[in-house]
Amino acid sequence: MTKKFKGFLLYVGLIVLFGASMYLIIREGQAHQLVSDSADSAHAPQNLVEGFSVFLALMAEHIHSSFGLLLLQIIIILITCRIVGLLFKRIGQPMVVGEILAGILLGPSVLGRFAPDFSQFLFPHESLGNINLLSQFGLIFFMYTIGMELDVDAIRKKLRETVMISYTCMFFTFFCGLLAAYFIYDRYGREVPFLPFALFIAITMSITAFPVLARIIQERRLTRTHLGTVALAAAANGDVTAWCLLAIVVAISQAGTMLGAVYNILFAAVYLLIMFAIVRPLLRMVGNLYHNPEVIGKPLVMLMFLLLLISSYLTEIAGLHALFGAFVAGLVMPENMRFRKIMTEKVEDVSLIIFLPLFFVSTGLRTEIGLIDSAEMWLVCFGLILVSTIGKFSSAILSARIEKESWKNSFLLGALMNTHGLMELIALTIGYEMHILPPPVFVMLVLMTLASTFMTTPLLSLINFSFRTGERLRLRRTETVGQGPFRVLISFGRAGSGPVLLDVAFRMFGRGDTKMDLTALHLTVGSDINPLHTAGFEQVSFEPFIREAKRLNLRVSTRYEVSNNAGDTIVSLVNDEPFDFLLVGAGIAMSNLPTDIEARRIRKSLFSLLGGARVQELLSPGSLIHDKTRYFIEHSRCSVGVFVNRGFTRADHLIVVIDSEADLPLLHYARVLLRSTHGTAALLHRRPSDDASPALDTVAHELESFIAHTENVHLLPERELTRESFAEADFMLVGYATWNIISDVCREPLRQMPSTLIIHHRQR
């Protein structure tokens, strides 16, 4: 008897033994019960059909249970917010605008109007308390991360530069809000005291949404610019002040009068003193000691969360609102950015992905657009939007001009500072829950928030378009064609691709007639990247590139951008700035690197389920120039090179494919490359044997001249690419138009090709 069979018998014996024991225990226990099974047996299903009916009844009961309904609500809310947010992202709007609108779509304004029965089933009145409670927790975590995103020391350093812009913008809009509240109070706010009513409208108009603004600045590639720095610092200054004012407004509103709120304000002053004078220095010491994932354990994370909850609790019971305490808790976190990044990662994903959409729907359920039911009320709504926009826009432009900013930057600052978004929505919700803002006014201000945030991106585009023509005309008057260095932009995705592209650029342009100016670009696709995380992404992406630049003794500039559309960003960059050459990688389609071969193998196995012919098309040489690369070539105003990495190490033996006169500029690139590598070059002139056109004679004459004046160059005897053409070659130059031809007619030989640079040349 084998050991395996003995083990099998042992397992069977144990199962039989324990099964019999459990049966005896159950029988013995039933003998002691006082309730008979007969009543239950009478209602028990007698067959599978009756059993299925019982199953459906139990399922319906669980669907209507409070926990089951909450899970269904969260699922529908997350899916709706994500879909609508992505749709708005596609048209260049911040996702938060779509998510706010998704909340309104699920509320009484849309779902409740067109599908009232389903709306009542999905959001019964008694279930809204759970959504509101969870959304409040989400807002606490969100305000905590917003506080951590604000660098207090950086704000202090920029205070002198931005104090005029931030406070002029905020207080002028605050005054406009008070004025607007005065004119609409008699009609819409008589049931509440004027002071809190006016203060809430004024504070909501004066807030700038820092998180939305930060992501818009990322998308517009303004993070490292003077304009982006000033806008972020001004918004940060204004937001800190606005939330302190909001805490005072909440205290005054709850106390009823300014005199009654004196102790609330005194408590706020003492609280802030303790947090910044005692807690912050202690946390600074913690941040200096613990700033990497290895040493930040659960006890430390629990301590930070405990501080957050205690801070929120203290401000809540003092009448300042819990969100103010969460915001301050984020502000006093250690300045060490690595510590803040780790803490943000632990909080942000859950708060942004799950809890914030609940807040949007919670707000949407209160936003019944039908309350604005007359032409007069719509006129008031448009008036509030106009007052808010003109107040923010004009005050930002005026203060920026006083600070000697250009007209263009002043207008752009006005558009950026007019972003309200999520922060205003939070302030509005506080006012609504405190019964200070009547429902019609709340709806008007929510629409104002949506309109002001929605108009930011189109306004920025309009301002840039308006000033761009004049700038180009001035540039043409001051620049002479061909002067200045040869500017090369290297755009790469994977960190490992950067050094290879740099080596190619160095060999191709390092010994040119003009000095080479190199800029490296790396993009992170997705505008919802937290600004705290971008520094880490940038360091990881550029570290190998910078190491290779030092080895080659090259000075390079690096640019890191966050974008929703990599193609548009790269093309606009090379077109807006005077770059002469764009160098990009071709991806994995014909690469012979082990990792790329494995990726192609996996892709092939997946795509084979969809059809083998399509897979062959995707893996063919012609698939190299896919849609994104073709977009670069066809929309860039400079020359473009697409590099195919086939194990590139050197370019000592070059092959240049010439098909027509359009390929003759490749000879210039070949001459510079040979000057750098001191290698050899083989020219392959593709020509039909029976063609004797003048164009062919011109090409032949140019090739003969190039061979006569350049060392170590010869003409290959073959008229078409073959496997033997690549026998000695380790690098190939080919034109874009020619590649489109040979990738179709020379598929088999191209499988043996060396590393290749496909060039689409434009005259400099």
Image (cartoon, helix red, strand yellow):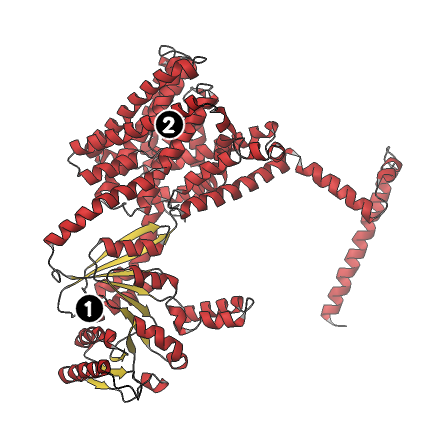
What residue is drawn where x is 49% and y is 70%? 615
- Locate residue 443, reporting x and y percent: 45, 26
Q: Quadrant of residue 170?
A: top left
What residue is drawn where x is 30% and y is 63%? 633
**Residue 621, above or below 85:** below
Residue type, label 2: Phe
**Residue 615, above or below 118:** below
Question: Which residue is identified by label 1?
Answer: 509
Residue type, label 1: Phe
Q: Is residue 270 visible?
A: no
Q: Secondary structure at mark 1?
A: helix
What residue is drawn where x is 34% and y is 56%? 567
**Residue 184, above or below 311:** above
Q: Quadrant of residue 17?
A: bottom right
- Split into 4 quadrants, where in the image is the N terminus? bottom right
Name the foreground residue: 722 vs 30. Answer: 722
Kindly report which numbered mark, 2 or 1, lies closer to the viewer in this rendering: 2
- Split into 4 quadrants, where in the image is the C terminus? bottom left
Question: Which residue is identified by label 2?
Answer: 382
> Residue lying farthest front?
693
User: Is label 2 in contact with label 1 (beta carbons under 8 Å)?
Assistant: no
Name the foreground residue: 461 vs 713. Answer: 461
